[in-house]
Image (cartoon, rainbow, N blue to C red):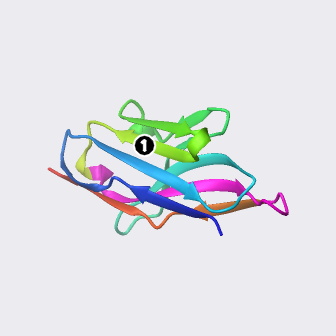
Amino acid sequence: QVQLVESGGGLVQAGGSLRLSCAASGRFFSINAMGWYRQAPGKQRELVARITRGGTINYADSVKGRFTISRDNSNDMVHLQMNSLKPEDTAVYYCNADVVNLLTRRNLEVWGQGTLVTVSS
């Protein structure tokens, strides 16, 4: 069983910063892409940022220049540094990973439980 555990959410004022972290645990062969998604109340879940094992990154247009995703392959972790936060960034942020099963070598998409980020105006 593979698990993703997020940390670092909380309440921050507009213009402030937060850093989210996500750690993968369990038995797996490897992890391909890792990323962060978010879901605001009444809205669909959307991609925030994603990074491949090789370091290719893509960001949602709404966070470009403010958020930075990084990855620690040796520790199976992904981080999201969020600066210049806006009230519209308020959402539950979910970690996501494409995990390669240890035995079957098939890809499996895994989600974390989510961490709440609230940005006050």
The count of marks equals 1
In-image side of 96 versus 22 (left or right): right
- Tell me which residue sits at (50%, 56%) in the image: 95
Q: Nearer the viewer, residue 38 or 27?
A: 27
Viewer-closest of 104 and 15? 104
- Identify the element where label 1 is drawn: strand
Give the left or right position of residue 10, taking residue 99 as reference. Answer: left
Q: Is residue 2 above or below residue 23?
A: below
Dot 1: within a 10 Å radius of its alpha carbon, few (fewer than 14), some, or many (20 or more) residues? many
Residue 102 rendering spot, x and y as whole percentages: 78, 59
Q: Which residue is mark 1?
A: 80
Residue at 21%, 40% (x, y): give it.
16
Check the image and report above or below for 52 versus 2: above
Please state the horizontal and vertical placement of residue 50, each as a whole percent of the image: 56, 43
Callout 1 amino acid:
Leu
Whether residue 96 is in magenta: the answer is yes
* Magenta residues, start to end: 88-106
23 to the left or right of 40:
right
Q: Position of residue 10 (x, y in %)?
A: 26, 56
List x then y, in percent, for residue 111: 56, 63
